[in-house]
Image (cartoon, rainbow, N blue to C red):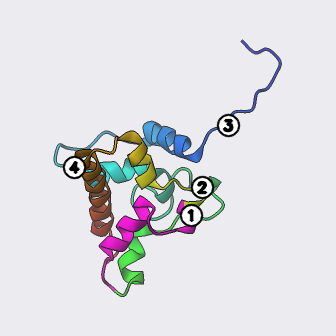
Amino acid sequence: MFLGTRLPIVISLAAAAALAFELTAAPPASAEESHGKELFTRYCGACHGPNGTGDGVLSGSLKDKPANLTLIAKNAGGTFPTQKVMRFIDGTTDVRAHGNPDMPVWGEVFKEQLADSPAQQAEIRKTILEITDYIASIQAK
């Protein structure tokens, strides 16, 4: 029922990204579909797009256009910098877009979701590596 008042709706971009994922993610095409791709779609796709080219459903609402992640190896002299990309995702390396409210630092999000046991920390590292491996697999030839 409309009461004649308008309440501002405040939603974080991380929550919007999760909502966008829920609204736009297609079910996996097969059981063989990469878990890394699924994780990438869930955590990165709303901004970086389903193919990593920076055209996600939220990209138009951001101040800075998300990076085209398919060009990382090309921009790094032809070699994919696995450790560097992992540090961007986990927040150890400052990325302007990841350091402000426009982009969550996923390492922090993963740590909030899991306790600090060694097994759970290993699971966080595994998740970040799977996302990184997927990004490496989509590099432009």
Give the spatial CA distance, label 1 vs label 4. Answer: 29 Å
Name the residue: 51% across, 55% down: 47
User: Are dots 2 and 1 in contact, CB under 8 Å?
Assistant: yes
Q: Quadrant of the N terminus?
A: top right
Task: Determine which residue is flagged by label 4.
Answer: 33
Name the residue: 41% across, 75% down: 71
Task: Determine which residue is flagged by label 3.
Answer: 10
Of callouts 2 and 1, which one flags the residue occurring earlier in the amino acid sequence? Answer: 1
Magenta residues, start to end: 78-98
Give the spatial CA distance, label 4 vs label 2. Answer: 29 Å
Instruction: Give how far across and how far down residue 68 sits, in percent.
Output: 46, 69
Give the spatial CA distance, label 1 vs label 3. Answer: 20 Å
Q: Amino acid at mark 2?
A: Asp
Name the residue: 37% across, 73% down: 84
Residue at the outermost front position? 117
Q: Nearer the viewer, mark 4 or mark 2?
A: 2
